[in-house]
Image: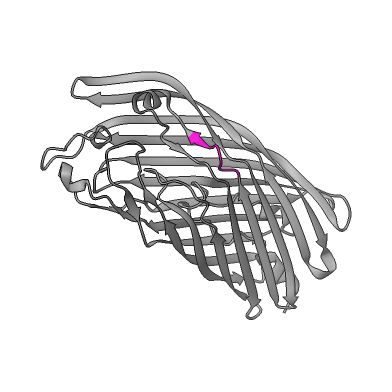
Amino acid sequence: MKLKSVIGVMGLTLLPTLSHAGGFDLTGQPIDIIFQEGNYIEAQVGIVSPDVRGTNAAGPVIGQPTDFGNVANDTPFGTAGVKFDFTDRISGAVIYDTPFLRSTTYEGGIFTGTAADVQATTITAVGRLKLGENFSVYGGPRLQRASIDLQGPQQLQFLPTPPGQQPTPFYQVDIRDTSFGFVVGAAAEIPAFKVRAAVTYNSAITHDFDSIETFTTPAGTQAVPGSVEVETPQSVNLDLQAPITKSTLIKAKIRWVDWGGVEFRPPAFEAATGRPVVEYTEDTFSYRLTVAQRLNKNFVGFVTGSYEEDGGEEISLFKTVDGYFGLGGGIIYESDDGLTLQLAGEYLWLEGTSGAQIPGAPLPDSRFDDASGFAASFKVGYRF
């Protein structure tokens, strides 16, 4: 049993963070590929399947049910990366990632027809310089493409929907932007014992969107041009790994994300309603602990647990859970010629929220209880 082999496969990203906790954080912005030995390429596909159900007693007043149904849509994702050693001390990688994703739809209840899709995809170029046997630094630029597609129904004006008809969207906005940020970090290692500690800083990225906000009322449709600024938050990842035995590895990750102050304030929407679409007020800390065990020459099994504390966020139309606890695991196959296959899954218990989803509106509180979710991924890697 080779310890090196266990360490190698555990350099792979295990599982995404469920997208409906921690703002709309998904993958945790990993750069593990830069620590792979030799030249290496990988690709991953997966899906996050949340079940977030709520109620509001005002539904029957406007001809809708009390229950919202599941407001959180399944979210597929993909990542990929390639890493090269240029010299004994210098290496580099290019990483494609989907760090921020969220898809929300109200298909029942008082807010039927309200929907939002938020997506940020990034391409990151990372270079690593070994300063000696035990220390290295790394960093590089990050290109991010962000999009927000939002619509709200007549119920946002508290108008009843005629029986048998679908609500007409009252408000719509669909925006796109590309901007730049960076990543920088440092690692300390003890190669003889396969121990590593790495700290990575991911910069905030500011997007300046040109927007056209469309309002549809009984008097007609009005399109309002404008601009809106949205920032994807800065974050810090602390990654630790160490062997317990020759065939067992433990790996820990702590992630801080600066969600406090992240908001979406389209100017015409705020002028019409007196509030932003969404506003985050609390930072998040998430934790993951993974233990991997070599089973035989070609297979490694692992179990993983994750936790994010309830941050005290107030409920809104697009903030319905706050905090989670998760358990999962998976299996890794290594061939003798450099091919690695990984299958992973995790079940999460989400902390639902309650309160007024639209502040100041003459509505009873909404409640989201017993939320849960499942995340699964499949990854292929090849060392060449």
Res 289 → quadrant: bottom right
**Color theme of the render:** one colour
Q: Nearer the viewer, residue 61 or 286?
A: 61
Residue in view at x 73 percent, y 76 percent: 244
- Coordinates of residue 81 in the picture (x, y in percent): 62, 50
Q: Nearer the viewer, residue 287 or 339?
A: 287
Q: Is residue 57 magenta?
A: no
Part of the protein shown in magenta: 258-263
The image shows residue 290, relative to residue 270, as above or below, that is below
Residue in view at x 41 percent, y 46 percent: 315
Res 114 → quadrant: top left
The image shows residue 262, relative to residue 67, as above or below, that is above
Residue in view at x 30 percent, y 35 percent: 152
Identify the image quadrant of the N terminus. bottom right
- Left or right, 316 with respect to 194, comes to left
Residue in view at x 17 percent, y 42 percent: 62
